[in-house]
Image (cartoon, rainbow, N blue to C red):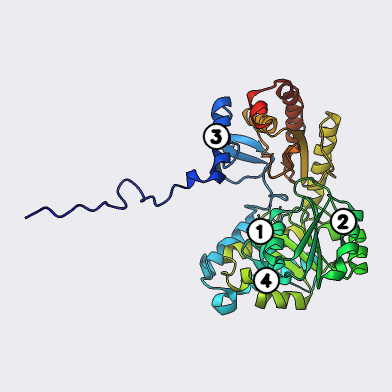
Amino acid sequence: TAAAPTRPNPTAGGARREFDFSSLPEYEILKVWKAVGDLTHISNPFYRLHDGRASNTTSIDGRTIVNFSSYDYLGLNGHPEVAAAAKAAIDRYGTSVSASRLSSGERQVHRDLEAALARLSGTEDAIAFVSGHGTNVSVIGELLGPEDLIVADAVIHNSIVEGAKLSGAKRILCPHGDLDAFERALRLNRARYRRALIVVEGLYGMDGDVPDLAGLIRLKRRYNAWLMVDEAHATGALGATGRGIAEEQGIDPADVEIWMGTLSKTLAAAGGYVAGSRALIELLRYTSPGFVFSVGLSPPVAAAATAAVDVMMREPERAAALRRNGRSLLAKARSRGLDTGLSIGASVVPVIVGNSGQTIMLSEQLLKRGFNVVPAVFPGVAENQARLRFFVTSEHTPVQINSVIDAVAEELPSIRSNSSIVGAIVG
Ligand code: PMP
């Protein structure tokens, strides 16, 4: 009898490949970056493997490195009270609620968290989502539609841009911080649209500056628009007790329709939230797709964030320490002639280098000297605006702050004068 025909084993030698995604034109940019890295012997600054708890120090390849790339702004990640709350929540509920909260995923830890977030924000209520990015996409994407207008700052976070795209609303991006441009956009367009939304960040994650909230509130009243403020980098960093831009600028939180924040930075967890009026939160609870059709926050995550709010509000000295450190890093950088752009010296201080290749080289040199400062390059920022972004925490010491800025000031001139192959290739 003839031998049975052999059929290819789809899993032999790894997964069967139906399509080679590296043939996509979008993949070319990754190949270029890899080639530049190989030519210049500069290691990839992204997706580096860290070990342990990243705070003002981190561990990379077994070395302890001074770290300026953690959003743990008030040092609450791993705080004994925060960790104990997470562990107790696992013991009681396990690691998942295994359903959308709408159906059978509602737990007391969620209600406790939302009460704490409303207290922190000074609002009637709050709602917590499993992702900060997803919060913006889901909330903006659902509240606004094709008959609406969204006016946002040009350097607004990607999650807001994606939410605005999803909504199908008319989108206008205004030059960064230019209130006249916001006014013009509303004056020329408002009448043609049903709803209008103005979106800004409480503290801008790329530039470390703040919006003029009182001016924006005047605008939204004049043009009958809603105002949304993303507090991702402001919580813990602004205001005498770290409650954000409203506390910093003496604004009544009720004057802003939609407060948005993340649990992943100062609050030492993961997820996002919206705080606002009871009606807004109730509406989102029943309509926001990222809430209704997604699992409830994992219990240890919700409990950790709740404990982080409690510690932060009980110990305002943490926010004061962050502010001192932010101002001190900014002053030191300026004294060494570095370009810190618009930063006010809080949680985010950029040092603008300009050229993407030089910024990556600078980051690599700093790592060799024991400092982790991650570059922000095109397309995350405009082509000639590449920068190192320093995330300052309450935990940094004066020595760490002074020595990293000294290292930048020492390395930068030689990187600039060395018209390197990197600069030639990536411009
Ligand atoms: N908004 C802003 C301004 C952010 O910077 C970020 C993340 N860096 C997000 C939203 C998304 O938050 P998360 O990382 O918690 O998803």
Q: Nearer the viewer, residue 337 or 235?
A: 337
What residue lies at 62% left-to-right and 68% top-to-bottom? 290
- Measured as percent of width and height from the top left, residue 357 is found at 67, 31
Q: Does residue 255 appear anywhere in the picture?
A: no
What residue lies at 93% left-to-right and 64% top-to-bottom? 218
What residue lies at 74% left-to-right and 43% top-to-bottom? 392
Sooner in the amino-acid sequence: mark 1 or mark 4: 4
Sooner in the amino-acid sequence: mark 2 or mark 4: 4
- Measured as percent of width and height from the top left, residue 172 is found at 80, 58
Q: Which residue is mark 3?
A: 34
Compute the Cα span from label 3 to label 1. Answer: 28 Å
Q: Which residue is mark 4?
A: 112
Q: Does residue 358 appear anywhere in the picture?
A: yes
Q: Nearer the viewer, residue 15 or 83?
A: 15
Does ligand 1 reach within 8 Å of label 3's beta carbon?
no
Q: Nearer the viewer, residue 119 or 279?
A: 279
Which of pointers 2 and 4 indicates the residue nearer the eye?
2
What is the number of the mark on residue 133? Answer: 1
Check the picture and name the quadrant holding the N terminus.
bottom left
The amino acid type found where label 1 is placed reads: His
Contact flag, marks 2 and 1 (Cβ < 8 Å): no
Check disc 2 and report its element: helix, strand or loop: helix
Compute the Cα span from label 1 to label 4. Answer: 22 Å
Which of pointers 1 and 4 indicates the residue nearer the eye?
1
